[in-house]
């Protein structure tokens, strides 16, 4: 049998109106800390779950936040999603997720699905679709309770972003100080029609070109039916392009590429960091599990998540003016770029 507010009230020995006000986080709820604790304990022991549909029909908040995410997003995006869920929970909200992949039309459907489920506000982690997003912009331009996160160019909306270009510049500067003479940027191979203007790629290129105007950019396969596709690509670069151009350091798009490259460098007899410097991105667990610990770029996901939730709750509370934040990534220096006798 479904547990109701009246059941909670009976167990806590208070009125059901007070239970409704306390559990609904109403500003007019007048209850001492002890009474609130008694109500919350009774609700927990009985397994009470609020009727969100009824709450919405009464004009109340659903206490749900929608998140649009690409189902094939990088691992770090899902780490950020976990932080968003935690930050929302600290304010009494739950997360409702809608997924789509590389298709703005499906993303629009996901947006409407979230709205139909009565979410109080929306966070977008899936919007970096160059030359495909005009209709998406049109659909979302009137949405007031919306925050874009990472890789965004939605200047008409609130956003929270990370200055990846500045991070790449910091990495290049560090490599130069360590005595590396010829740094290259190593990216996943992208679809030239869909992804050439992808912001996550463009920001890396922008930072690299500013810090290293004559530097080389190489690509490796992102997805392949061959399990050794990335290894073969890295091996080919080491013996051909890197040798021909005298490349002695690489900034990789993520830690996974960097780890595979380091493995192939070792097989080729190139010592990291004495012969070759390698920088990754995202600070995944693998960074500290490699024979030579990996230098990597990282950003504070907890801070980004907390800022995003703070912005969205301000909009839910009635704020009209736009809020934006851009955070600087940190270069975590480890063994893969520290030559003997040199300081970080």
Image: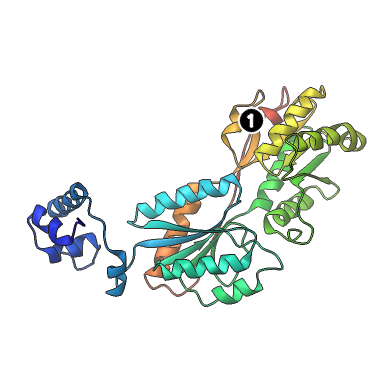
Relative image position of residue 154 (x, y in whole percent)? 60, 68
Q: Residue at 75% across / 46% down in the picture? A: 187
Relative image position of residue 179 (x, y in whole percent)? 79, 32
Q: Is residue 70 visible?
A: yes
Relative image position of residue 123 (x, y in whole percent)? 49, 62
Callout 1: helix, strand or loop? loop
When the figure is inspected, residue 50 is found, relative to residue 139, above or below; the finding is above
Give the position of the C terminus as an image quadrant.
top right
When the figure is inspected, residue 305 is found, relative to residue 344, above or below; the finding is below
Q: Residue at 55% across / 58% down in the picture? A: 125
Q: Is residue 156 left or right of residue 51?
A: right
Q: Work out which residue is located at the far right of the displayed protein and give it.
A: 244
Q: Quadrant of residue 309?
A: bottom left
Identify which residue, 147 or 163, lies in the foreground.
147
Q: Is residue 323 visible?
A: no
Q: Is residue 305 left or right of residue 212?
A: left
Identify which residue, 298 or 173, lies in the foreground.
298
Q: Residue at 74% across / 61% down in the picture? A: 194
When the figure is inspected, residue 199 is found, relative to residue 256, above or below; the finding is below
The local crowd at label 1, few if under 14, some if 14 to 19, many if 20 or more residues have their Cα within 10 Å, is some
Identify which residue, 321 or 114, lies in the foreground.
114
Relative image position of residue 120 (x, y in whole percent)? 39, 67
Residue located beneath label 1 in the image: 334
Q: Quadrant of residue 92?
A: bottom left
């Amino acid at each position: 049998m479904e547990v109701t507010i009246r059941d909670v009230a009976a167990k806590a020995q208070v009125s059901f109106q007070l239970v409704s006000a306390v559990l609904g986080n109403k500003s007019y709820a007048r209850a001492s800390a002890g009474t609130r604790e008694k109500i919350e304990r009774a609700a927990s022991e009985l397994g009470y779950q609020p009727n969100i549909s009824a709450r919405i029909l009464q004009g109340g908040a659903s206490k749900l936040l929608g998140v649009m995410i690409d189902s094939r997003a990088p691992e770090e995006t899902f780490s950020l999603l976990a932080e968003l869920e935690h930050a929302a929970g600290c304010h009494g909200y739950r997360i409702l997720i809608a997924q789509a992949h590389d298709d703005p039309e499906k993303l629009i459907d996901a947006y409407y699905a979230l709205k139909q489920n009565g979410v109080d506000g929306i966070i977008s982690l899936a919007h970096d679709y160059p030359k495909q997003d005009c209709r998406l912009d049109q659909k979302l331009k009137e949405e007031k309770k919306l925050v874009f996160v990472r890789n965004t160019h939605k200047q008409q909306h609130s956003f929270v972003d990370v200055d990846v270009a500045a991070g790449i510049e910091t990495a290049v500067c560090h490599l130069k100080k360590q005595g590396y003479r010829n740094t290259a940027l190593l990216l996943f191979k992208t679809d030239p029609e869909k992804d050439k203007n992808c912001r996550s790629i463009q920001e890396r290129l922008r930072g690299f070109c500013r810090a290293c105007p004559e530097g080389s950019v190489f690509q490796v396969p992102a997805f392949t039916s061959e399990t050794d596709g990335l290894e073969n690509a890295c091996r080919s670069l080491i013996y051909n392009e890197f040798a021909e151009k005298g490349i002695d350091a690489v900034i990789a798009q993520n830690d996974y590429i960097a780890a595979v490259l380091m493995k192939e460098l070792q097989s080729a007899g190139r010592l990291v960091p004495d012969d070759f410097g390698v920088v990754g991105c995202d600070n995944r667990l693998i960074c500290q599990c490699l024979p030579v610990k990996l230098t990597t770029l990282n950003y504070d996901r907890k801070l980004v998540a907390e800022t995003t939730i703070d912005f969205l709750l301000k909009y839910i509370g009635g704020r009209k003016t736009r809020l934006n934040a851009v955070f600087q990534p940190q270069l975590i220096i480890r063994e893969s770029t520290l030559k003997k006798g040199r300081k970080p």
